[in-house]
């Protein structure tokens, strides 16, 4: 295996970890970056499987809260409602992901221009939502009503389009439905766990017969990089959002999308 291929896997893993939990589309970033550096993975599987690192990052940071939630689940109605809400919020994306898997991987993942378009459009929408001066009705992610969780989960299905952003779709939907910024980001963290784990398991199953030892080595490098970078982001994101909102991420999306268009125009 060539050293530059491993270096590309390391770079893409870092980008995955740094962007997975912020509303800028980690998939869009690594697909665009992979296009321009000439990185190709078997069945576009690397881009999904390195999410395991990001999953473990959030499990690591939230381990004490998850353990507390698990202990309270048998007897605490709030814990039961929250868990039910997360499960129901996960289901829409699971259904769409299963039935549209082939179209997503073979068509949408192969369109850099689409990714650039959704990055820019999503940035404009997020910038607009961030500037709305509405009084939030829901400020505690653990206390979201079940209907709100389901509605946010439906918004998450938009993230099947690369460049939209899973966290961006859930956060934007939550804000429009009356949540505050911090709790919207935190709910996105919790919803990420079953969603990303499900995507990882399903993609691994679908590609079990075509992956090689070289693929395993690349995925391992990307996974470790995503884990380390993801821990860094998860630990600081909520405080950053509380101080600065989502405008910095919106502008970042717009800049990256426009830069991607320029790159496609000049270099293809």
Image (tube, rainbow, N blue to C red):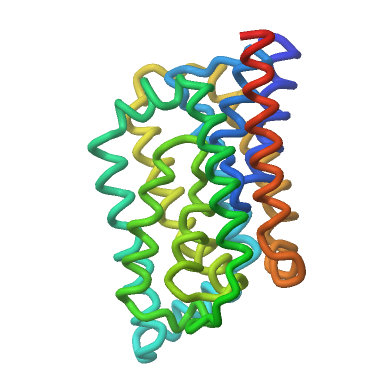
Residue at the location (33% across, 33% down)? 205
Tell me the quarter of the picture where residue 61 sits.
bottom right
> In the rendered view, would you say 265 is above or below 201?
above
Against 267, residue 13 (above or below) is below
User: Which quarter of the image is occupied by the N terminus?
Assistant: top right
Q: Nearer the viewer, residue 104 or 77?
A: 104
Can residue 251 be seen in the rendering of this structure?
A: yes
Q: Is residue 235 left or right of residue 152?
A: right
Q: Is residue 263 left or right of residue 176?
A: right
Which residue appears at 44% of the width and 77% of the height?
Answer: 70
Q: Split into 4 quadrants, where in the image is the C terminus?
A: top right
Residue at (52, 45) in percent of width and height:
165
Measured along the vertical axis of the image, is residue 196 above or below residue 30? below
Q: Residue 218 location, x and y as percent?
A: 61, 24
Query: Measured from the top left, where is residue 148 in percent x and y?
Result: 36, 73
Q: Is residue 224 visible?
A: no
- Residue depicted at x 68% and y 68%: 238
Residue 35, percent across and down?
60, 17
Where is residue 27? Give x, y as percent. 54, 36
- Labels in figure, total: 0
Q: Would residue 110 be found to the left or right of residue 217 on screen?
A: left
Closer to us: 28 or 131: 131
- Residue 104 to residue 250: above or below: above
**92 left or right, relative to 260:** left
């Amino acid at each position: 295996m060539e050293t530059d291929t491993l270096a590309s896997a390391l770079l893409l893993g870092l980008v995955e970890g740094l962007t997975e939990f912020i509303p800028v589309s980690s998939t869009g970033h690594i697909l665009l970056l992979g296009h321009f550096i000439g990185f190709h993975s078997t069945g576009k599987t690397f881009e999904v499987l390195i999410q395991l690192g990001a999953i473990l990052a959030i499990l690591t940071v939230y381990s004490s809260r998850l353990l507390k939630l698990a202990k309270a689940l048998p007897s605490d109605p709030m814990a039961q409602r929250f868990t039910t809400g997360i499960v129901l919020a996960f289901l829409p994306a699971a259904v769409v992901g299963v039935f549209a898997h082939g179209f997503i991987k073979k068509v949408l993942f192969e369109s850099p221009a689409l990714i650039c378009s959704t990055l820019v459009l999503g940035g404009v929408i997020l910038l607009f939502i961030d500037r709305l001066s509405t009084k939030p009705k829901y400020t505690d992610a653990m206390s979201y009503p079940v209907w709100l969780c389901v509605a946010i989960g439906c918004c998450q299905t938009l993230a099947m389009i690369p460049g939209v952003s899973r966290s961006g779709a859930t956060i934007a939907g939550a804000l429009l439905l009356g949540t505050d910024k911090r709790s919207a980001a935190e709910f996105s963290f919790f919803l990420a766990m079953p969603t990303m784990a499900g995507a990882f398991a399903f993609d691994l199953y679908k590609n079990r017969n075509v992956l090689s030892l070289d693929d395993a080595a690349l995925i391992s490098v990307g996974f470790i990089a995503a884990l380390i970078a993801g821990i860094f982001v998860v630990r600081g994101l909520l405080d950053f959002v509380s101080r600065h909102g989502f405008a910095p991420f919106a502008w970042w999306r717009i800049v990256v999308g426009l830069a991607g268009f320029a790159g496609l125009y000049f270099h293809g």
